[in-house]
């Protein structure tokens, strides 16, 4: 007689078997080799923030990587934003751990007293540093266990103190903003009577229902959207804030009642406040920045004196690049006048597909905001930004994606109706002929305005100086009447020198220039350059973070694709390596880009003289363990004229990779059987396609990618057609649909809390499932609590461990005894 086994025992055995299955096993965090771990833990270089007058540098201490415990703290994901609920602050914001002051005149450095104690286990979370307009103080925020506090640094005494006993609300990234006279700060405050957060219902009240009926509302693939009534209630709780004025003596003056405060700024004269507040109805289809909102001008008393707009929900904005919502947008104060509100409105219904001679119109309304607004400029392209100068001078920049055209107009905002003149009309992809961007200065009320020369008759232009030999930043004085420029400075080999700020009075001829200077062997530091004598005076002395790797080889290499497109990449080899030593295992790390012309695609986009900081996110870290690296090799996808780049994406991608591999082999750096391809995000998508459509690589590393383009049906990256308009393109470009062709091993890494549009974690999960089902060779690594970029030390070390093991497994083999034909595999 057969013994009857209880059902519970069968279920328990099945459960234990599942727990023991390698496919679902929970691994522990691992660390890579000591050489890589040491780079992750190398000290970081401080960031520098010049004062408005240029007489001080605020040095901000950059923290080490946080522990996974910090990322595991409770996090709210609401309407496209992530917030730490107990502190009303962005949960993944970048913070600093300390402050120092450096005087530019003599490079004297001062420690800042008064900060709370901190240590490695519990570092300070300093954020949002803001110089006061008079340069005498710095405001910043400090996140504590249950709140974010406003703090103030007095420059003269180098002492910091808490400004007021209030809780700031930074959920919408609303950092405290200085009043123009430096007498206080506007701040978003957590209302004292806000109450507890709403509890999720134990039993749902009913289903979540949405309905559509004939009205098109295409949308990109957003993450972290509202999903139910409890999300809506939680959104209202977290984003409700009251506007208050923080006086420097600690007094708190209420200015406006609580609302879903989205943004605020004082007028340059300090008399008015420009306030944007969200309101219902919310959406489950778009992030918060598309929610309905009011835009109002308030007096300092809190009384509304003018409504600029009451904008509806923006669910139906066309997805064509260059499309915008209808109604006023980009509402802001004119920086160079007392109180003038400026905004732009679309003249083509906001739809970039519509043929129209006029696209946008710029409007202005000055206090007391009565009467019809003045039209400052009408544009045949889409507005990109305005740089204000004075009543007779402002620069209006517009552009158009489909033609890659950019136009800069000179207008006289104090004389509406005056005809605008064209300063520059060019293709913005053409870096070699870029005249540069106007340099700005901070005026007396803390607003950026044009930095002029020659008594206002000339602009100062700052450019990247792109050239066939690499980027060489420059500073020009551009005469507005003649349209001719005079070069004040251009970076020269063997250094890369970035102009930052002209020092001295506005009316004086430019003489002293604050620069950031570096070379291949020298880390970036700050200097003052005398433009007349060329003399340099060093201000900071930041040391090399990884001196043991200082001798690596670096070369900007050039090679050609089979269709004639000129390509470049930066080739790195380990310290001491010589071609006579033989080929190395090699990693090609890249990211494709789209262009409208082959000439633009062929232009150099780097400098051979920049310092390369080798850290956990840099592909150069593999130099430490003996690999060669081709970093950022050009992978241009060109669509000239009416052609769409992605119609030939695969063919162009493989052709670029083939050219790079051929060049690496020709130089003796690599052999064909020991080259891996890798990339992050769109670079991961690239990697999977390279493995699917060629036999150029021995293995691939793909981090946080999207592999099935039918899951991003309303466009992705630079593709603006929908899946239904170009299904053959979506299928041809999707590695998931071509998973049966991937016959090389691929490592898939993804954060389990990815917040990037389109790169849902399920993309990697489904890609792995396809490869497993088809008999491919793949490994899937999901990092807990990580979003699109990985931050926790444990996660980063484990990522490097996985990559190191993968490269060692598939690349550290003996070179092939017989040569492989140089043609590689043709695109399928």
Image (spheres, helix red, strand yellow):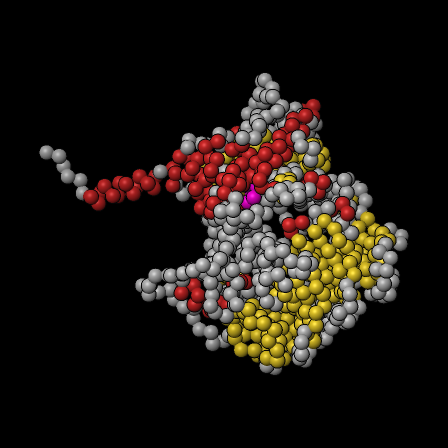
Classify the position of the N terminus by image quarter: top left
Magenta residues, start to end: 680-684
* Closer to us: 606 or 106: 606
**Which of the two residues, 710 or 40, is positioned nearer the viewer here?**
710
Q: Residue at position x 53%, y 78% from top?
A: 257
Residue 540 as seen in the image, left or right of residue 323: right
Q: Nearer the viewer, residue 233 or 353?
A: 353
Picture quarter containing residue 160?
Answer: bottom right
Q: Can residue 52 be seen in this view?
A: no
Instruction: Indicate the position of residue 264 as horizontal and vertical percent values.
Output: 61, 70
Q: Is residue 275 above or below residue 127?
A: below
Residue most extreme to the left: 1
Image label count:
0
Q: Is residue 40 left or right of residue 412?
A: left
Residue drawn where x is 72% and y is 68% of the image: 376
* Residue 378 in view, yes or no: yes
Q: Main secondary structure of the magenta part?
A: helix
Quarter in which the C terminus is drawn: top right
Looking at the image, is 260 positioned above or below residue 325?
A: below
Q: Is 748 above or below relative to 512?
A: above
Horizontal placement of 675 versus 486: left or right?
Answer: left
Q: Which residue lies furthest to the top in this view?
A: 818
- Give how far across and how far down residue 277 sits, in percent: 55, 71
Question: Which residue is at a point 38% across and 41% down the rendered structure image?
Answer: 24
**Residue at image location 85% in from the left, 63% down from the top:** 457
Magenta span contains residue 576:
no
């Amino acid at each position: 007689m057969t013994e009857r086994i209880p059902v519970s025992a069968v279920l328990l055995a099945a459960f234990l078997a599942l727990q023991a299955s390698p496919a679902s096993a929970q691994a522990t965090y691992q660390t890579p080799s000591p050489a890589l771990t040491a780079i992750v833990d190398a000290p970081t270089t401080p960031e520098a923030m010049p004062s408005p007058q240029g007489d001080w540098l605020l040095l901000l201490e950059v923290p080490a990587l946080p522990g996974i415990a910090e990322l595991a703290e409770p996090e709210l994901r609401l309407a496209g934003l992530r917030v730490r609920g107990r502190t009303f602050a962005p949960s993944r914001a970048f913070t600093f751990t300390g402050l120092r002051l450096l005087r530019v005149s003599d490079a004297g450095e001062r420690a800042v007293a008064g900060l709370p104690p901190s240590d490695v286990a519990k570092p300070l979370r300093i954020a949002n540093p803001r110089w006061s307009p008079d340069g005498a103080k710095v405001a910043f925020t400090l996140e504590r266990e249950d709140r974010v506090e406003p703090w103030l640094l007095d420059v003269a005494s180098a002492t910091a103190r808490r400004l007021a006993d209030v809780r700031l609300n930074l959920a919408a990234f609303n950092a405290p903003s200085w009043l123009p006279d430096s007498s206080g700060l506007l701040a978003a405050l957590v209302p004292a009577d806000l109450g507890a957060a709403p509890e999720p219902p134990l039993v749902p009240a009913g289903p979540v229902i949405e309905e559509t009926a004939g009205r098109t509302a295409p949308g990109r693939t957003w993450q972290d959207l509202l999903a139910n009534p409890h999300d809506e209630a939680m959104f209202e709780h977290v984003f409700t804030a009251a506007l208050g004025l923080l006086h420097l003596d600690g007094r708190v003056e209420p200015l406006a009642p609580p609302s879903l405060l989205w943004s605020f700024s004082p007028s340059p004269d300090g008399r008015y406040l420009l306030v944007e507040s969200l309101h219902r109805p919310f959406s489950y289809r778009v992030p918060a920045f598309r929610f309905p909102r009011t835009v109002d001008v308030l007096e300092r008393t809190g009384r509304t004196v003018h409504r600029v707009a009451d904008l509806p929900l923006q669910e139906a904005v066309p997805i064509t690049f260059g499309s915008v919502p209808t109604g006023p947008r980009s509402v802001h104060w004119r920086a160079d006048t007392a109180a003038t509100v400026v905004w732009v409105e679309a003249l083509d219904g906001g739809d970039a597909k519509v043929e129209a001679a006029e696209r946008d119109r710029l409007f202005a309304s000055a206090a007391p905001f009565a009467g019809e607004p003045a039209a400052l400029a009408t544009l045949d392209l889409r507005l990109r930004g305005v740089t204000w100068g004075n009543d007779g001078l402002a620069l209006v920049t517009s552009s158009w994606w489909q033609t890659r055209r950019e136009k800069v107009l000179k207008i006289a905002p104090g004389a509406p109706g005056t005809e605008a003149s064209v300063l520059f009309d060019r293709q913005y992809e053409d870096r070699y002929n870029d005249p540069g961007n106007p340099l700005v200065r901070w005026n007396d009320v803390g607003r950026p305005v044009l930095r002029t020369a020659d008594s206002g008759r000339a602009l100062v232009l700052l450019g990247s100086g792109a050239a066939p030999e690499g980027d060489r930043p420059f500073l020009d004085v551009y005469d507005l009447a003649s349209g001719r420029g005079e070069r004040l400075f251009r970076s020269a080999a063997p250094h890369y020198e970035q102009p930052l700020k002209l020092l001295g009075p506005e009316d004086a001829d430019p003489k002293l220039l604050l620069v950031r200077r570096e070379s291949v062997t020298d880390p970036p530091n700050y200097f003052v350059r005398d433009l007349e004598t060329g003399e340099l005076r060093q201000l900071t002395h930041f040391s090399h973070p990884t001196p043991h790797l200082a001798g690596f080889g670096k070369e900007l290499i050039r090679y050609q694709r089979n269709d004639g497109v000129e390509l470049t990449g930066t080739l790195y080899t380990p310290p001491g390596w010589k071609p006579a030593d033989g080929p190395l295992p090699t990693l090609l790390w890249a990211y494709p880009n789209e262009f409208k012309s082959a000439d633009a695609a062929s232009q150099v986009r780097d400098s051979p003289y920049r310092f390369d900081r080798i850290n956990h996110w840099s592909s150069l870290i593999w130099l430490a363990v003996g690999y060669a690296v081709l970093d950022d090799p050009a992978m241009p996808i060109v669509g000239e004229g009416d052609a769409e780049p992605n119609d030939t994406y695969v063919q162009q991608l493989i052709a670029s990779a083939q050219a790079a591999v051929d060049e690496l082999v020709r130089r003796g750096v690599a052999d064909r059987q020991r080259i891996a391809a890798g990339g992050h995000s769109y670079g991961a998508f690239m990697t999977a396609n390279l493995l699917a459509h060629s036999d150029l690589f021995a293995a691939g590393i793909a981090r946080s990618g999207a592999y099935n383009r039918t899951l991003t049906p309303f466009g992705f990256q630079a593709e603006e057609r929908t899946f239904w308009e170009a299904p053959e393109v979506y299928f041809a470009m999707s590695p998931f649909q071509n998973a049966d062709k991937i016959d090389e091993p691929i490592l898939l890494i993804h954060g389990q809390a990815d917040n990037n549009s389109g790169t849902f974690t399920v993309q990697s999960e489904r890609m792995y499932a396809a490869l497993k089902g088809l008999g491919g060779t793949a490994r899937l690594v999901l990092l807990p609590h990580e979003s699109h970029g990985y931050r926790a030390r444990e996660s980063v070390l484990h990522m490097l461990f996985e990559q190191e093991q993968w490269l060692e497994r598939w690349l550290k083999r003996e070179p092939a005894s017989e040569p492989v034909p140089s043609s590689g595999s043709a695109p399928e």
